[in-house]
Image (cartoon, helix red, strand yellow):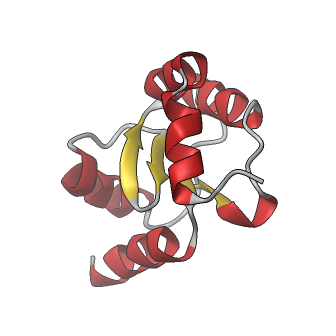
Amino acid sequence: MAAVKSFVDTLLANHKVVVFSKSWCPYCSKAKSALATQNISPDSLKWVEIDGNPDEEYIQDYLKELTGARSVPRVFIASKFFGGGDDTAAGAKNGKLTAALKAAGAIA
């Protein structure tokens, strides 16, 4: 589990926006679509598909420790949990996503 914590924590520390996702997940697609409406600089966004990762279950367990849920997507902005697919889509509509991205310096 220490390796998983290091993996996740390093991603959060090194990228302004990190999304933990599964390729087949409709809520992940919803988050991806919402994020695509923002003008995020390419080097700020890290999309992490965890399906097929041998540590997938451990990653989700650690995400639960960080966010209270192990479901995906888990969207982090400036190392802070922003929300899942519905939260991210709502944030794109109500301006909260844009505000968080601007505050993080992730908008191109």
Q: Is residue 21 visible?
A: no
- The residue at 51%/52% (across/down) is 103
Instruction: Point out residue 30 in the picture as x, y percentages from the top left corner.
Output: 62, 24
Q: Is residue 28 left or right of 13 when viewed as pictured?
A: right
Q: Is residue 93 visible?
A: yes
At which x and y percent is residue 100? 49, 43
Residue 23 coordinates in the image, percent (x, y):
66, 41
- Give x and y (percent) for residue 69: 26, 40
* Residue that appears at 51% across and 25% down: 91
Question: For this rendering, which residue is in front, 19 or 93?
Answer: 93
For residue 41, side relative to residue 73 (left or right): right
**Left of 59 or right of it: where is 27?**
right
Task: Name which residue lies at 46% across and 75% down.
Answer: 13
* Up-down relation of residue 57 to residue 87 (above or below): below
In the rendered image, which quarter contains the N terminus?
A: bottom left
Looking at the image, residue 3 lies above or below residue 96: below
| Nearer to us in this view, 64 or 67 | 67
Placement of 30 over or under 53, stated as above or below:
above
* Quadrant of the rendering where the C terminus is positioned: bottom right
Of residue 10 and residue 49, the one placed in the foreground of this image is: 10
- Counting the numbered discs, the total is 0
Q: Is residue 1 left or right of residue 72?
A: left
The residue depicted at 35 percent of the width and 53 percent of the height is 60
Residue 43 figure quarter: bottom right
